Amino acid sequence: MGCPDWPKCFGQWVPPTQVSELPENYQEVFAVAGKSIAKFDAFKTWTEYINRLIGVIIGFLIFLTVVFAFPYRKSDPKIFWLSFLAFVLVGFQGWIGSRVVATDLATWMITIHMVIALVIVGLLIYTITRSQSFIIQQRQAHPHLKKLLLLSILIGLIQTISGTQVREWVDHVALMIDNRLLWIDQAGMVFYFHRSLSSLNLLVSFYLFWQYRKLFHPHQLIYKSGLALLLLMSLQAFTGAILSNFGFPGQMQSIHLTLGSLTIGLQLFIAILVFTKTEIESHKA
């Protein structure tokens, strides 16, 4: 809520840098969902504003992706139409962002906002990967590995959704308890559920990578991707341990979220390599 309105920020296209640039009763003027906003914080305001600017840049880049995908509309229409869908969704995502602000960070709106972002990333990964020739170099995986891979992705999505609930819980506890080190004592089932999913997903991914070692050469992309996935998951588990044991430091929350997003993106990329090999190979032929 660094910017209490949308698309402007405190009614300005370029947000203020100090409270003196706002009216004296700004907390009531820019009230959200019938509640007065918190005191002005330049860091939070510009963090949110930069987030919006990056969103605009992403929109332009996805539009260019659609433009460059246009020649594929006859040879491989999925590349074009899924790129176009990503462009439509990024516009919808902007509108959802405005609803997140208007509802004063309603939990379910934050979850929708996060899921749509992951869908957009997934579509872009798929269209870019599909357009590359290296995908035909992969060896077919056993059916039970495909099922485990899908299970891992499903666990990752549920973990992400539960993570948004944990984030809301942290915000709620922060309003009641000043001492960060005591927040973990108020942890509910959602937190322990989220943490348990992390362990389960890591175990499934370890088993998948062990199987990749038997199926693929260490120089093959899918093997390297599996190894990178284990590294990301391990780092994410490590940052999660820091969060729960050291009072949920804000900077580590951002790192934890970033690692989680990269993890799901890499899981999707591996799934694309495993599931679309035959289709792409026959298309190239």
Image (cartoon, rainbow, N blue to C red):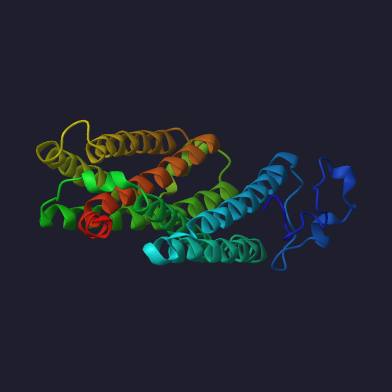
Residue at the (20%, 57%) spot, across then down: 278
Residue 52's place in the image compared with 209, above or below, is below
Find residue 128 and report its horizontal and vertical position in percent: 41, 51
| Quadrant of the image occupied by residue 47 | top right
Residue at the (49%, 51%) spot, across then down: 167
| Quadrant of the image occupied by residue 81 | bottom left
Say left or right for 34 vs 143.
Answer: right
Front-most of residues 168 and 54? 54
Residue 204's place in the image compared with 28, above or below, is above
| Quadrant of the image occupied by residue 161 | bottom left
Q: Quadrant of the C terminus?
A: bottom left
Find residue 30 and report its horizontal and vertical position in percent: 79, 60
Residue at the (34%, 45%) spot, across then down: 266
Say left or right for 278 vs 121.
Answer: left
Find residue 14 and report its horizontal and vertical position in percent: 81, 48
Can the viewer see residue 192?
Answer: no
Residue at the (42%, 40%) spot, across then down: 259
Find residue 187 and report its horizontal and vertical position in percent: 41, 49
Say left or right for 118 vs 25.
Answer: left
Front-most of residues 103 and 11? 11
